[in-house]
Amino acid sequence: MDELATIARPYADALFKAQGSDLAATAVWLDKLAAVAQNAQLLQFADSPKVQVDQVFDVIAGVAGDPLPAAARNFLRLVIENGRLSALPEIASQFRSLKNVAGGTTDAIVFSAFAMDEQAIGEVSAVLEKRFGRKLAVKVELDPSLIGGIRAVVGDEVLDTSVKARLEQMKMALIS
C-alpha cells in the first residue's frame, strides 16, 4: 500500500494543480474512473501485452458512462500509458484529501442500518460537524448488520452509536 501511495502522490498533486479551478467536477470524474479501475478483470485485461493503450482507454471510457471531459480523457490516457491504472483508486483518494484540505473539509463515512433521506443526512452531518469540530463531506453507506443507529468514521476517529455496538458493550459488561 505504501508503494501505491508513493506512486499516486505525484499524479494527485499534478492533477490538483492543473484542475485548481474546478476541483469538485474533477473529483466526480476521478472517483468514477477509480471505481472502474478497481475491477480485477479490467486490471488483468490492461496488463495483457496483447492489448493496446487505446483498447484499454476505450473500455474504461465506455464503462465510465457519460462522455468524459477533455481533462479526464487526457489524464486517463496518461495513467494507462504509464502503466499506473492499478494506482488510480489511490490517486483519487489522495486527490480528495488535497481537495478537502484546500476546502477545509474532512471525509466522513456514515454507516447506517437503513437508507437516509437528504434531511436526515443533513441533520447527522450537522451533529457530526459539531462533535468533530470541523466541516465534513459526508458519504452514507448501508450496513444492515448495525441493526439500528449509525457508525461514523472521520479520518481515524470512529463514533459508534449503533444498536450492534451497544449490544456488544452489554455483552462485555455481562461477561466481566
Image (spheres, helix red, strand yellow):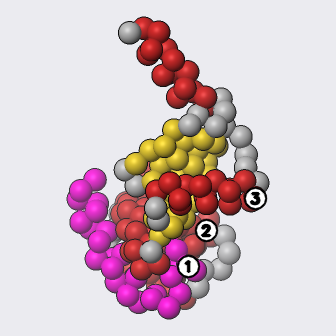
Residue 12 among those drawn in magenta: yes
Residue annotated with mark 1: 24
Report the residue at 61% width, 28% height from top.
Answer: 163
> Which quadrant of the figure has residue 175?
top left
Q: Is residue 45 left or right of residue 63?
A: left
* Residue at image location 46% in from the left, 56% down from the top: 132
Give the extent of the magenta segment.
1-27
Please state which of the two labelled residues, at mark 3 or mark 1, is closer to the viewer. 3
Q: Amino acid at mark 3?
A: Gln
Q: Amino acid at mark 2?
A: Ala
Decide if residue 59 is on the left or right side of residue 48.
Answer: right
Q: Amino acid at mark 1?
A: Ala
| Callout 3: SS | helix
Task: Give how far apart the Cα atoms at labels 3 and 1 are.
Answer: 22 Å
In front: label 1 or label 2:
1
Give percent across and percent down for residue 57.
Answer: 50, 73
Nearer the camera: disc 3 or disc 2: 3
Seen at 54% across and 64% down, the residue is 137
- Residue at image mark 3: 119
Q: Is residue 144 visible?
A: no
Give the Cα distance between marks 3 and 2: 29 Å
Looking at the picture, how far across and down is residue 49, in whole percent? 35, 63
